[in-house]
């Protein structure tokens, strides 16, 4: 009898109360709990009892109770007390507790307690092992064998033994151990692997009658130990697993469990990544040839996908992941594979080529399962990833052609064999593209699909598109020719009553491979846009086929620009534009049509510019196009206008923008009488104006740099055109309308977003200037007005963007540094910065404001960082007290729990320190600022290391500390760090005086950022109690 007198005890009343609480909370015989608050109250009282030091005394009384829920809580209490309260348990009773827990678990197995209780006890034992096994002298030698011996001695079943061993491996894989402790625990598992493997083999030996439950537990145990076992222990189990793959067995659980185990071997064991071709890949290929094909044929003939058939699909996919290189290398290999083990494979002999080709046939069968994915079957997407791996393997393989064998005089040359392998690969992918074309075909009308089924099928179509790209890399132009011919032939033979689903599916496949095509080497694409195909596609009604056609046109819009023969390409392009324009007025198609038109016009500006008159007609019919897409349409027209000589842009630019400005004016005038309608109109017109501004912005030319003579000449012409009185008035009108809108609606979220988009598109750096570009200075003034009315992240983000435009990069690409802002830009910033600071600091100074508005804090300091980079001196010219308030706000932000706010504040402070040092005339002012605020900043940093800041932001705090150490007076830095770390009010942490002194010595003895980072990270781990844990060290590498 095991002594339990050392365990703390609870009064009978407390034990009985705990039992009552458990039964009321988790197994009420009567519905006494009516609300979640009642349940929470019961759980809290139970938790309070459980966390008491005497709660160890709950374990045995609760386990002895007749109610299984009470028993479970007893086991759970043991686990919790060991895991959480071990430090308070008397260490001289540790071995006694070990013996008690082993006996409790052994007794529970002997009386066949339910699995959910046994599992808790097994977890508790494993937690106890984590406490007792590591150390210079282990307090639990051979702990796994010790437990198994005790369990077996009390009559535990093999199933219970396997469950215990599985939990041991699972718990150890997630244990938070490092260093010597981790090595000791790993060794304790390694010492047990032979015993575990023997137990598994005994339970799954196919030569004796098998108990399904025991077999499942054994294989679950095997899967848990796979990453621990050495290869020599895994290899003998593989033939047993293959022998269990008997589709004719009355109980399919054996097949499913064996299949799952083989899949785990191929992904997580030492045989992963393609190893074990003789012991794993080839026996499985032989089994597939002899037995797997029967399963696949049964599915294809009956249409019924059984659990075994589904499991086989997953096994095939796992083989593809594991053995793709082997499969690619042996496509035409004559080398024979002979079966030896297990017995069901003895006497079988097939060539590698035959086995690989049989495997590919089975994969194609599953890829092309009859029916629609997500509705009729769930298997076809499982195989898609293989075709990517197989294509990659084909690119990198050396084909095994049996060179080691003596070649007969009449045998084909080896070169022909290699060509044969390539031919087989192409044949497989040719069938694949045909199968996938069928699989992405939508059903006919009246299918009755639900929205979820349609959505799932659309996701599947996108995944198929990725697989088709891999097929294209194998087949190249042959694949495109097949699909184009397929469309052409179906259109040529189509009758009026035939549906369009097959043609739509082919067009979808062509669209999906767009990113893989080299347009210059794809002449067959031209056929898509000729009358024989595009001319026969529907131009009215029939939503899906037209949507797909429009999406295809958008995807291939840049193909026209790659063709050298403009004379033959331009008519095709205009036909395509006409097809797209005809769909703009259809509400169900206008989104795809407008997007396609935008892509076409953007990619083919110069080709379309001579056809500007046709776009004038499109502009004239703009009112017939849905409001939601007018912005894209006008952006398309503007793209074509931009390709005109700047002096010729004036009239068309005025023609498309004047109506926009007029409508904005009408909306402003009606804002008092019809406020909602006026606001909606303003948002729509601002969106349209943004589209126009984007279209007028030139596209990047890879052959042109900012200092190229051609661009400089173009910019001079643009500047001349900008001085045209009509354009000057247009810009003035745009600015006036924007200003008036901001005065009315700058506090409205939707209007603010529309204005933000417009600001980003209508302002630019010098090389991207257009006829309607507005200057950064006036726009900053508008942003300041908006900030004064309401501080938002949107306006602060715009302030940062416009600040950068005030000091653009140099025009010559060979200059690596900026020359500095102009006096005019300096004056603008000296005026704008105090206004933004006054508004922002006034808002953020309110109690709880920074915690409640992390987006504002982040964008505020991001904008200050931008200003500090370009206009450092402006900070030292602020009104009295403004810089002090800003720095105090930044220091407060260093203590925030919201990472992005803290990081933005860190970045700003580091930038201000660095940039102030770059400008020698600012160094005295910087020194004065650091004298006043240096210690406060250092305090925030060191408190952040010790636990105030989130760990994900520690690296940013390190960068800021590095800036201070490197840039500031060493004597002052030493004083600040010493004062903060040794202060009695230093934040509560695990850091000792010795660790603080070690940290100070490391920091102050170097100017290397790497060493500062290493010292800071070590101090952070110690301060937070994470030193010596894998969790802590893992976080440093994330």
Image (cartoon, rainbow, N blue to C red):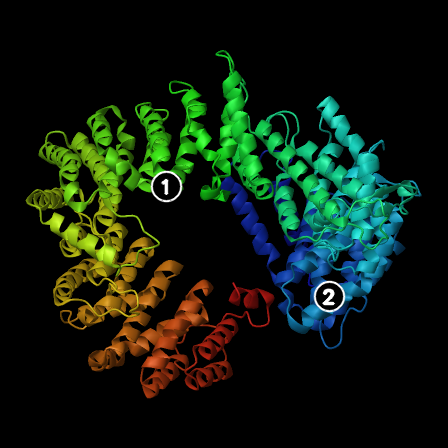
Q: Quadrant of residue 269?
A: bottom right
Depth check: give the residue in front, 919 or 554: 554
Q: In x, y percent, where is residue 590? A: 34, 28
Judge from the rendering whether residue 21 lies leftward or rightward of residue 263; answer left or right.
left
943 versus 457 height, above or below? below
Give the quadrant of the N terminus: bottom right
Secondary structure under tag 2 reads helix
Q: Is residue 112 visible?
A: no
**Residue farthest toward the front in the current orientation of the protein:** 409
Depth check: give the residue in front, 873 or 522: 522
How many circles with numbers are drawn on the protein? 2
Give the residue at x 67% y 62%: 82
Q: In x, y percent, where is residue 688? A: 23, 37
Q: In x, y percent, where is residue 440? A: 56, 29
Judge from the rendering whether residue 355 lies leftward or rightward of residue 759; answer left or right.
right
Q: Quadrant of residue 752?
A: top left
Inter-mark Cα distance, 2 to 1: 62 Å
Depth check: give the residue in front, 874 or 919: 919
Judge from the rendering whether residue 846 lies leftward or rightward of residue 348; answer left or right.
left
Q: Is residue 16 visible?
A: yes
1005 versus 16 height, above or below? below
Secondary structure under tag 1 reads helix
Q: Which residue is mark 1?
A: 561
759 versus 808 height, above or below? above
**Residue farthest toward the bottom in the current orientation of the protein:** 971
Q: Which mark is residue 186?
A: 2
Judge from the rendering whether residue 345 lies leftward or rightward of residue 466; answer left or right.
right
């Amino acid at each position: 009898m095991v002594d339990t007198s050392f365990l703390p005890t609870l009064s009978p009343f407390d034990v009985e109360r705990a039992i009552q609480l458990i039964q009321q909370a988790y197994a009420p015989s009567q519905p006494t709990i009516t609300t979640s608050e009642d349940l929470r109250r019961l759980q809290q009282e139970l938790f309070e009892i459980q966390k008491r030091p005497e709660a160890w005394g709950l374990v045995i009384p609760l386990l002895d109770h007749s109610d299984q829920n009470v028993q479970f809580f007893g086991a759970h209490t043991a686990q919790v007390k060991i895991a959480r309260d071990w430090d308070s348990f008397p260490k001289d009773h540790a071995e006694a507790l070990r013996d008690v827990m082993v006996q409790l678990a052994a007794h529970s197995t002997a009386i066949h307690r339910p699995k959910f209780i046994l599992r808790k006890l097994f977890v508790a034992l494993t937690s106890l092992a984590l406490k007792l096994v590591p150390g210079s002298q282990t307090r639990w030698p051979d702990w796994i064998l010790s437990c198994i011996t005790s369990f077996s001695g009390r009559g535990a079943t093999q199933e219970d033994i396997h469950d215990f061993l599985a939990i041991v491996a699972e718990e150890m894989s997630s244990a938070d151990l490092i260093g010597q402790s981790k090595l000791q625990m790993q060794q304790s598992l390694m010492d047990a692997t032979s015993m575990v493997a023997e137990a598994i083999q005994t339970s799954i030996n196919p030569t004796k009658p098998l108990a399904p439950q025991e077999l499942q537990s054994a294989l679950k145990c095997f899967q848990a130990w796979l990453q621990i076992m050495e290869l020599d222990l895994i290899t003998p189990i593989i033939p047993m697993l293959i022998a269990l793959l008997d589709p004719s067995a009355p109980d399919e659980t054996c097949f499913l469990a064996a299949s799952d185990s083989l899949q785990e071997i191929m992904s997580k064991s030492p045989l992963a990544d393609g190893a074990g071709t003789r012991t794993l890949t080839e026996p499985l290929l032989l089994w597939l040839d002899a037995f797997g094909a029967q399963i696949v044929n049964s599915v294809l003939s009956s249409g019924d996908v059984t659990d075994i058939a589904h499991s086989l699909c997953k096994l095939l996919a796992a083989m593809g992941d594991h053995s793709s290189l082997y499969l690619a290398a042996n496509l035409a290999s004559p080398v024979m594979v002979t079966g030896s083990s297990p017995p069901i494979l003895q006497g079988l002999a097939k060539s590698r080529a035959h086995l690989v080709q049989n495997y590919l046939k089975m994969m194609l069968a599953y890829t092309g399962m009859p029916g629609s994915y997500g509705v009729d079957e769930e298997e076809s997407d499982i195989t898609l990833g293989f075709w990517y791996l197989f294509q990659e393997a084909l690119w990198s393989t050396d084909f095994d052609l049996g060179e080691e064998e003596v070649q007969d005089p009449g045998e084909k040359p080896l070169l022909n064999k290699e060509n044969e392998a390539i031919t087989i690969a192409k044949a497989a992918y040719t069938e694949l593209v045909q199968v996938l074309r069928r699989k992405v075909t939508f059903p006919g009308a009246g299918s009755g699909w639900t929205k979820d089924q349609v959505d799932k099928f659309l996701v599947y179509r996108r995944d198929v598109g990725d697989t088709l790209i891999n097929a294209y890399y194998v087949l190249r132009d042959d694949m495109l020719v097949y699909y184009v011919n397929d469309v052409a032939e179906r259109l040529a033979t189509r009758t009026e009553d035939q549906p369009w689903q097959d043609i739509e599916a082919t067009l979808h496949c062509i669209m999906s491979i767009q990113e893989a095509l080299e347009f210059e080497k794809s002449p067959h694409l031209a056929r898509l846009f000729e009358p024989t195909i595009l001319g026969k596609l529907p131009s009215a009604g029939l939503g899906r086929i037209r949507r797909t056609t429009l999406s295809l046109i958008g995807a291939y819009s840049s193909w026209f620009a790659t063709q050298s023969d403009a004379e033959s390409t331009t008519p095709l392009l205009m036909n395509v534009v006409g097809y797209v324009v005809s769909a703009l007025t259809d509400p169900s198609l206008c989104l795809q049509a407008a997007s396609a038109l935008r892509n076409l016009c953007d990619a083919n500006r110069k080709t379309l510019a001579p056809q500007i008159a046709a776009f004038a007609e499109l502009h004239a019919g703009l009112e017939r196009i849905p409001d939601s897409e007018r912005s894209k349409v006008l952006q398309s027209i503007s793209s074509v206008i931009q390709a005109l000589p700047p002096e010729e842009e004036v009239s068309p630019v005025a023609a498309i923008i004047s109506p926009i400005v007029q409508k904005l004016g009408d909306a402003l005038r009606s804002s008092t009488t019809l406020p909602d309608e006026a606001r909606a109109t303003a948002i729509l017109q601002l969106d349209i104006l943004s589209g126009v501004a984007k279209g007028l912005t030139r596209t990047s030319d890879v052959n042109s740099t900012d200092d190229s003579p051609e661009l400089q000449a173009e910019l001079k012409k643009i500047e001349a055109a900008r001085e045209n009185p009509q354009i000057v008035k247009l810009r003035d009108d745009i600015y006036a309308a924007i200003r008036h809108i901001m005065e009315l609606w700058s506090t409205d979220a939707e209007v603010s977003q529309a204005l933000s988009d417009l600001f980003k598109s209508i302002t630019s750096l010098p090389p991207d200037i257009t006829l309607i570009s507005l200057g950064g200075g006036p726009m900053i003034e508008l942003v300041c007005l908006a900030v004064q009315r309401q501080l938002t992240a949107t306006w602060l983000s715009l302030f940062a963007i416009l600040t950068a435009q005030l000091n653009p990069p140099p025009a010559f690409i060979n200059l690596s540094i900026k020359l500095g802002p102009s006096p005019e830009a300096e004056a603008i910033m000296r005026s704008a910065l105090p206004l933004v600071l006054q508004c922002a600091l006034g808002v953020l100074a309110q109690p709880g404001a920074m915690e409640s508005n992390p987006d504002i804090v982040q964008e505020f300091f991001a904008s200050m960082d931008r200003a500090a980079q370009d206009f450092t001196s402006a900070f030292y010219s602020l009104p009295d007290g403004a810089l002090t308030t800003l720095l105090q706000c930044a220091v407060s932000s260093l203590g925030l729990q919201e990472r992005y706010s803290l990081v933005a504040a860190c970045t700003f402070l580091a930038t201000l320190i660095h940039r102030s040092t770059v400008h020698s005339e600012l160094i005295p002012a910087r020194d004065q600022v650091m004298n006043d605020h240096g210690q406060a900043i250092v305090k925030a940093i060191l408190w952040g290391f010790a636990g105030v800041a989130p760990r994900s932001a520690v690296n940013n705090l390190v960068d800021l500390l590095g800036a201070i150490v490197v840039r500031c007076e060493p004597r002052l830095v030493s004083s600040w760090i010493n004062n903060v770390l040794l202060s009695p009010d230093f934040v509560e942490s695990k850091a000792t005086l010795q660790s603080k002194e070690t940290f100070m010595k490391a920091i102050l003895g170097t100017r290397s950022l790497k060493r500062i980072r290493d010292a800071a990270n070590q101090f952070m781990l110690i301060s937070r109690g994470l030193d010596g844990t894998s969790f802590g060290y893992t976080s440093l590498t994330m």
